[in-house]
Image: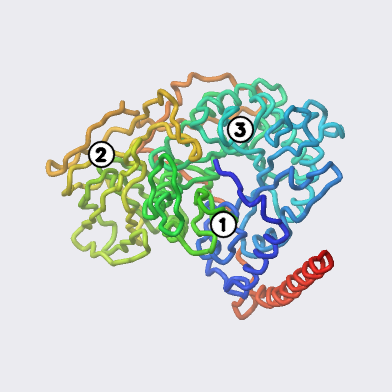
Amino acid sequence: MRHETSRGIPQLFIVLLVLGFNLISPLALGRAQDAAPDPRFGAVEAFWDTAAAVEAGVAWERILFKWSELQPNGPDDWNTLHVPDEWLQWAGAQGREVVGLLKNTPYWATDADPPLEANPPRGLDLPIDDPGNVWATFVRRVATFYGSRGVHRWIVWNEPDIPPDVYGQEWAGSVEEYYRLLKVAYLSIKAVDPEARVHLAGLTFWHDRDWLEEFLAVATADPDGPAHGYFFDVVSLHIYFQTDTVDYIVNEARAALAAYGLNKPVWINETNASPDADPQWPLTRPRWRVDLREQASFILQSYALGLAAGVERLAVYKLIDAGLSPGGEPFGLLRPDHSRRPAYTALRLATQHYAGTRSAQISRQPLVAQVTLDRGTRTTRVFWARTTAEVTLTVPALSTQATLIDQEGNEQTLDGGGGSYTLTLPGARCADETSGCIIGGPTLLLVEEAPVQDLGVPSVEQAQATPTSAINVEEPTSPETPTLRPTPPSVTLPPTTVAPTPTATAPPSPTPTETNTPRATVTAPSSATPTKMARATAAPALAPSVTPTLVPLSSPSPAPTGGSGQPTLRWVTACALLAGLIAVAAVVLALLVVWWRRR
C-alpha cells in the first residue's frame, strides 16, 4: 500500500517538467528498443522516465485516474491535465500498455459524513443509466474518453481490504458496497468498450486474509453474476518485503477462487521491498530492514517466484520516486533525481533473462532456493541462499557452457563439459529485527542455450558459517503500519525434497510443514451460481513440483520504424521537442507577467 505525495506540487508544473525531461531523453530523440519486451513485466508510472522504462523492458504501466482530480468540483468538470494525453502517447509509441486505476470519491459525489475520498459514492443502487448513479456516469465517461486513447484495462479502486481506522485506508464502505461499486463499473465500462478488461482492486492480503473469500461469497450470491463472470476479469495482488510470501499469497488467492468454483487470471500489480539503508536517501522506520542490495535481490526473486506461481503479469511499485518528499519511503527503482538504485539493474536483468518463460518450477531446500524457467530453447535458473550461510552448490549442466550473471549484471562463462557447474551463493543479510531473513541473499542467474530437462535439485557441497533460520513466511503488515497483529498466524515452508550433504548444517524448522500438492484448476461455470467448495480441496501450497503453464500473451508493438531501421518517431519527436520548449518558454513568460502585474 503506497500513497502519492505530490499533491502539493502544482500539476501543471509536474506535467511540464515530465514533458521536458522525456522530450530531451535519448529515447525521445529516436533511440528505440531492439525488441518488443515481454508483455508480462511492468512498472507503476513509467511515464516519469520513459527512456529508463524502455531500457528496463517495461511493457505495461499503471496510471492513477483519480475521480476526485478528474471531476473535483462536480459532474461537469473534466480535468484532462490529471492524465495528460502525452503520457498515453508516449506509452503507445513505445509499445507499452496502460492500465488505469480508478479511485477516490470527490466530496460532492458522496453523502457520507464526514466526506472522505474513501467513501462509497451515492446512487450505487440506481440503474447505470440513471443520472443519480454518479459513479456509473463518471466511469462511462472515463472509459469512453480514455478508451479512445488506448486504455482498455481498468482496476476498480485500491486496497479495499484495509480495515477502518487503519493507516492507509482507501475504502470506507463494506464488502457488499465494494461489490456494488465493482458491478456498476463493470457494466458501465463494458457498455462503451466491450473488449475492455476490469480488474478487482489490488489486495494487500495481510490486512484481512478473509476479504477475498467474503467478496466472492457476495459476488456468487448475485443471480446476475454468472452471465457477467461475476463482474471482474482479473484478481490483483500487492506483495511486499518477504520473498517467500510471493507464491504463498498467489496460491491463497487461487484457493479462494477455487473454493467458489472460479478460475481467474492473477496479476501482481505491486511488488517491491523499499530500502531503509540507501545512503543517498535517509529513512527511519520501525521495521523492514532492507538495504540496496536486498531490494535488488527481492526484485529478481519475486519476479521468478511470481512466474513460477503462474501469475499472468507482474509490476514493480514503482519506477521512480517522483515528487517524494525527503524522508518519504523510497519505493522507486530510480531516486527523485533519476539516479538509479541497484534494483533498476535487477529489473532489467529479470525482463531480459526471464522473457519468454513458458513454465517454471520452484525448488526449496533449507539453505537454497532455485527457480527454473523454461524459455523454450533457453533455460534460466535463478539461485539464492535462504540463510546467512554462504553456500557452494553443484548443479547439473544442460549444455557445454553457461552464462553466470550476478545481480549487478556482471557476466562470466562457465564450462559445462564436465556435466556440472559449481556456484557459490553469498549468504543473506537477515537484518530485520522481527522476521530475520525476509529476503534471500544476492541472486545468481544461470542462463543456458538449451531446453529444460529433469534437473532434480542442486547438491549443496559446502555451507560457510552457521546458518540462521530460513526466510520466514510470517504475517507482514503494510509498510506504513509496522505494528504486527497480536497473534500472527504461523505459515510454513515446504519440506526439503533432498537433504543437504553432511557438510551442510540444516537450519531448524520452527514452523509446521506445508504440503506440496498442486492446486487443481477449476473452470468457472457459465450459467449457474457456484457452490462454495470445501476449503481443504484448495489448501495453500508452496510447491517445488508444480510446473504451471503460463498463458502466452500478445506482444505489444515496438515503436514504428522507417526503411532505414531508425524510428520515424525521431523526426516527429524532434518537432515536438521544439514545440515543447516553445510552450514551456511561453508558460514561464506568462507566469512572469502575472507575477509582475501582481507586485
Picture coordinates of residue 278, whole percent (x, y) = 42, 55
Q: Above or below — where is 151 with respect to 91?
A: above
> Marks 3 and 1, Cα distance to the nearest angstrom?
27 Å
Which residue corresponds to mark 1? 59
How would you rate the neighbour count of disc 1 (Cα within 10 Å): few for under 14, some for 14-19, many for 20 or more? many
User: Left or right: where does residue 204 sit relative to residue 277?
Assistant: right
Picture coordinates of residue 452, whole percent (x, y) = 35, 52
Picture coordinates of residue 476, whole percent (x, y) = 43, 34
Picture coordinates of residue 413, whole percent (x, y) = 28, 67
Which residue corresponds to mark 2? 366
What's under tag 1, amino acid-wise?
Ala
Q: How is the image coloured?
A: rainbow
What's under tag 3, amino acid-wise?
Pro
Q: Which quadrant, please, contains the C terminus?
A: bottom right
Q: Which is nearer the N-term, disc 2 or disc 3?
A: 3
Q: Nearer the viewer, mark 2 or mark 3?
A: 3
Q: Above or below — where is 6 with respect to 561?
A: above
Q: Are marks 3 and 1 in contact (CB under 8 Å)?
A: no
> Marks 2 and 1, Cα distance to the nearest angstrom?
35 Å
Q: Secondary structure at mark 1?
A: loop
